[in-house]
Image: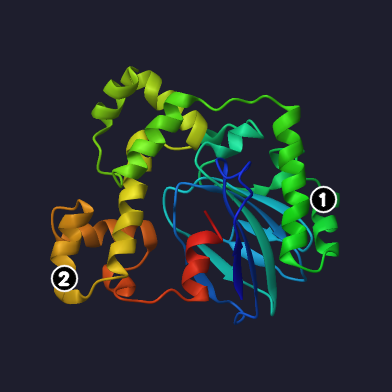
Amino acid sequence: MYKEYQPCALLSPYIDKYWEFKGNPEYGMRINILPDGCTDFIFTLGEATQAVNSSLTMKPYRAYFIGPMNSYSELVAYAETVHMLGVRFLPCGLSRFIRLPLHELTNLRISADEVTCFFDTSFAERLCEEDCLENRVKIIEELFIKSLYKHDLPIDPQIVFAIKQINRHQGKLPVQSLMEDICLCQRQFERKFKMNTGYTPKIYSRIMKFKNAVDLLRGTTSDNLLSTAIHAGYYDVPHLSREIKRLSGNTPYSFLSIPLTEEDVTLTYVEA
């Protein structure tokens, strides 16, 4: 079972959503997690253990940080039950609460206490004591709202503008055009962008372009694959296929006209 909960208006400029996943996957089931430009904190709420890319075992009643991803990663379920709660931050959103060197944390999945004291073990245990998603979200939002008023951590407006422009143009806007709009040289622009998002502007644009392509593929058929590739900004079907394979581990055909299911949504949101 997968549920989403939208943040309050005060937090919506920084947090994309809260999500909860509860289920009984087959032992050893593998799920490809797609990159989306975001970062997550994940709380394991039940007697569940998962291994991500064989590099991290997620133990019960703990908090974990999932860094920005520039390719897909693999989640393997090694338990009969899974129960996770995630906070998914918009690009740059996390920096309003916590200053982390995201450019050093790209593709990392680590225990939250290795990067911040914002969430400690007692906080995860407190979430476990609540019996519904709404109450857990309320506790999390109280912490974030308190942090908003306690710490003045402004977000770089130039990078926020650049991200909005890239998203608006679905990753197809030339980086040179962005630099001209915000009046920064390439070196300075890339340094600030990486510090705030974990990506170079080029790689972030590539991920947004891929994300848009996947959305388009879900509403098309194999007969329209060429027009979908062109619409998404790729030269041809082979170009689209190579990029989809690199970033998702699958072919474009695996996404064609597939209605969203709990498993599909998990691919998108469990690991940012």
Q: Which mark is residue 242?
A: none
State the residue position of label 1: 123
Mark 2 lies on a secondary structure that is: helix
Q: Earlier in the sequence, mark 2 or mark 1?
A: 1
- The residue lying at 62 percent from left, 33 percent from top is 96
* Residue 200 visible in image: no
- Residue 264 percent coordinates (x, y): 46, 71
* Image x and y of residue 68, in percent: 51, 45
Which of the labelled discs sits on residue 224, or is there none? 2
- Mark 2–mark 1 Cα distance, whole angstroms, equals 49 Å
Specify whether residue 101 is in view.
yes
Q: Amino acid at mark 2?
A: Asn
23 lies above or below 207: below
Instruction: Tell me the amino acid under the disc marked 1.
Output: Phe
Please name whichever residue, 113 or 272, is drawn nearer the observer in this view of the structure.
272
State the residue in front, 119 or 129. Answer: 129
